[in-house]
Amino acid sequence: MILFGWVRNLRYLSHAFEQRIARWGRGAVRLPWLKLSLLAALILIGAGLVTAIIGIEFWSVVGFWEWMQSASDVGESNSETVRNVGLVIAAVIALPLAIWRSWVAGRQATASLRQATSAQRQADTSHQELLNARHQQGAEMLGSDVLPVRLGGIYALRRLSEDYPEIYHIEIMRLFCAFARNPTGNDGGSALEDSRVRDPWEEIEGPQLGEDVQAIMHAIRFRTARAIELERTAGFFLDLSGANLRGANLQGADLTGADLRRTHLKNAFLRNANLSGSWFDSVMPSPPINGLIQNQLDQAFADPDNPPKLNGIIDDVSQEQLVWRRRSNDN
């Protein structure tokens, strides 16, 4: 390519020189021999230059190779020096690239984290809305006039309380206690089965415990240790005051601090029930008979330092003041 460039320049110079000579000679006198001479000279010059360049490059490569094979003053070969310099140059080039790549990766990770956080927040919101809907539906079922519907609401609320105790347990226990105090279908007493045959003894002793209240007492009996711990932390205690719990099975139930004032407990099963700090006190001039007898009370236990409060409570049979005899669960 260099030679062709020189030839093209030579032809241009020959043509220009011929025109100048023609002007000097007072006419268009052509001198072909001069053109050929200049062309030959330029070809020779171009060939010499190309030969010189090739020679210089060849001996430069040879010299560079010999220099690389020779040792430097510090005891390492020049090839190692070149290699080290190349590594330094590569590091200088690669460092900004690595920083840039890290910055890009960090921005991508931050964006991904934000998207994941937003998606998780939306999922949590949707899940919470679903749980709230379950709670509301269970509460509405609890207020139904149909016994099976009420039982379904009780079981649904109990399951929700067991699955998510930190969120719903205490709230559902409040709801259960309120239902036990004033069951649906009977503004003042215990809930009756919708189609149950009336017991003739009810006119004397009052209505029997309904299945819905029994289901609630079952849920209270089998509260988990975690649920009871949450109650203690929140300062929550069961409020069953005034409830009709005749014949209720409260075996092993934790009734610590429970409000049992005016609660009807005739024939209630209290074996191994924890009555620590529970309230039976009556401040009425004529204490109401709540159906308790000494034998029932002796089957329960309490913390020796925090016995149940029995002031004014009399035995339903002997009409004597009830006393606390059993001090702890070990006795």
Image (cartoon, rainbow, N blue to C red):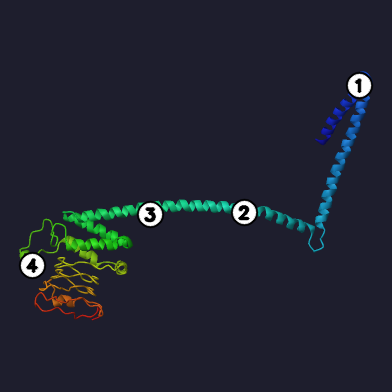
Secondary structure found at label 1: helix
Which kind of residue does numbered mark 3 sit on? Asp
Q: Is residue 277 above or below residue 53?
A: below
Q: Does label 2 or label 4 sit earlier along the sequence? A: 2
Asked if residue 171 shows in the view, the reply is yes
Disc 1 to disc 4: CB gap under 8 Å: no
Q: Does label 1 or label 4 sit earlier along the sequence? A: 1
Which kind of residue does numbered mark 2 sit on? Ala
The residue to which callout 4 is attached is 205
Which kind of residue does numbered mark 1 sit on? Arg
Q: Quadrant of residue 272?
A: bottom left
Image point 68% across, 55% down: which residue?
91
In-image side of 208 versus 85 (left or right):
left
Between marks 1 and 4, how big is the CA–CA gap? 149 Å
Q: Which mark is residue 124?
A: 3
Graded by Cα atoms within 10 Å as few (under 14), some (14 to 19) or many (20 or more), the crowding at tag 4 reads few
The residue at the far top in this view is 27
User: In the image, residue 142 lies at what x, y percent?
Assistant: 21, 56
Secondary structure found at label 2: helix
Disc 1 to disc 3: CB gap under 8 Å: no
User: In the image, residue 58 lies at what x, y percent?
Assistant: 84, 46
Which kind of residue does numbered mark 4 sit on? Glu
Graded by Cα atoms within 10 Å as few (under 14), some (14 to 19) or many (20 or more), the crowding at tag 3 reads few
The residue to which callout 1 is attached is 23
Q: Nearer the viewer, mark 1 or mark 3?
A: 1
Between marks 1 and 3, how big is the CA–CA gap? 98 Å
Q: Quadrant of residue 4?
A: top right
Q: Does label 1 or label 3 sit earlier along the sequence? A: 1
User: In the image, residue 175 lies at what x, y percent?
Assistant: 23, 60
Q: Does label 3 or label 4 sit earlier along the sequence? A: 3
